[in-house]
Image: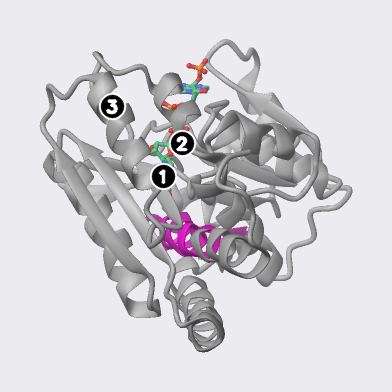
Amino acid sequence: MTAMLLDGKALAQKVRNRLKARIADLKKKTGEAPGLAYLVVDNDPVSAHYVAGKTRACEEVGVKSFVYPYPADMSERALLERIDELDIRPDVHGMLVQLPLPPQINVHAVLEHINPDKDADGFHPYNRGHLFSASPSIAPCTPKGIMLLLKENGIEVAGKRVVILGRSLVVGRPLSMLMLGADATVTICHRKTRNLPEITRSAEILVAAIGQPRFVTAEHVSPGAVVVDVGINVVDGKLTGDVDFDAVSEIASAISPVPGGVGPMTVAMLIDNTVSLFERRVLRGRPEKV
Ligand SMILES: NC(=O)c1ccc[n+]([C@@H]2O[C@H](COP(=O)([O-])OP(=O)(O)OC[C@H]3O[C@@H](n4cnc5c(N)ncnc54)[C@H](OP(=O)(O)O)[C@@H]3O)[C@@H](O)[C@H]2O)c1
């Protein structure tokens, strides 16, 4: 391997240490701790695994976690009512609904129902709108984590050609906005994109977020490019990214591994968002509803 490893696990630990100090300071000033609520419909093993990782990280830094598991056949109305209950709780500063949701629940209706001032994932259209208009907001955790992973590894984004594989509302689209805000020249690719390898080879920074194990091969990457692998796939019981790590790490200048790359950064950014929401509410007294 010749590429520099973008070690998200180590960086996320550093970020959590910083957050721990920030939270201790806030506790001294306010006598309160930030609280994050998780609404988990259909608490299957995968969702339970992700939520457990998030609550462990929260506990480490002093954020209180409130986990609410619900049955898979929960109605949309019932979920909206649970969100309302959490909205008026003064000890809950941020909340998130674990995705994906079962088919009887409209994900857009749910995300819109969360008070933007308690929107820890940054998925409410109000917060998305702020991101679109490049004004400060609560940004989605994975894209925010990717930007920090690049920055703290000394990788300049301004002026670079960035190619993002995947246009989801969770990763690809918000990342494109953050990259644009950081003065990159951005191309987003999806299933209908033609001549994909030609486009990806034009990237100085290539981000893969498609959910296709080892899809990105050496053929997709130009020598010296920075490659960020967002994918989380399970192959033969092992976590595997969207990038063929062994082959691509021989030609890239830097690459993030799976596991230990973007995943831990996402969790750290969730805590960062929760602390920001707490600060807004407790220190600046923002209104309950926007
Ligand atoms: N590390 C983390 O913290 C983290 C966080 C979130 C997600 N993830 C992982 O990242 C991956 C993507 O997640 P997501 O939520 O963004 O997924 P998603 O909602 O399924 O979106 C996948 C995107 O990839 C595109 N795509 C799929 N196959 C493609 C192909 N062969 N060529 C070109 N584009 C293709 C799709 O194109 P169309 O729009 O045309 O269908 C879509 O835009 C998954 O593995 C997920 O588990 C990781």
Residue at point 57%, 26% (across, down): 167
Q: Residue 279 lies in what quarter of the image?
A: bottom right
- Residue 25 in percent (x, y) is at 55, 87
Quick check: 143 above or below 169?
Answer: below
**Which residue type carries mark 3?**
Leu
Earlier in the chain: of badge 1 and badge 3, it is: 1
Residue 198 vs residue 38, the one in the foreground: 38
Residue at point 38%, 63% (across, down): 35
**Residue carrying label 1:** 87
Residue at point 20%, 47% (across, down): 68
Density class for disc 1 (Cα within 10 Å; few <14, some 14-19, many ≥20) is: many
Q: Which mark is residue 114?
A: 2
Instruction: Give the CA distance from mark 2 to mark 1.
Output: 8 Å
**Magenta stretch bounds:** 253-273
**Which residue type carries mark 1?**
Asp
Q: Residue 187 lies in what quarter of the image?
A: top right
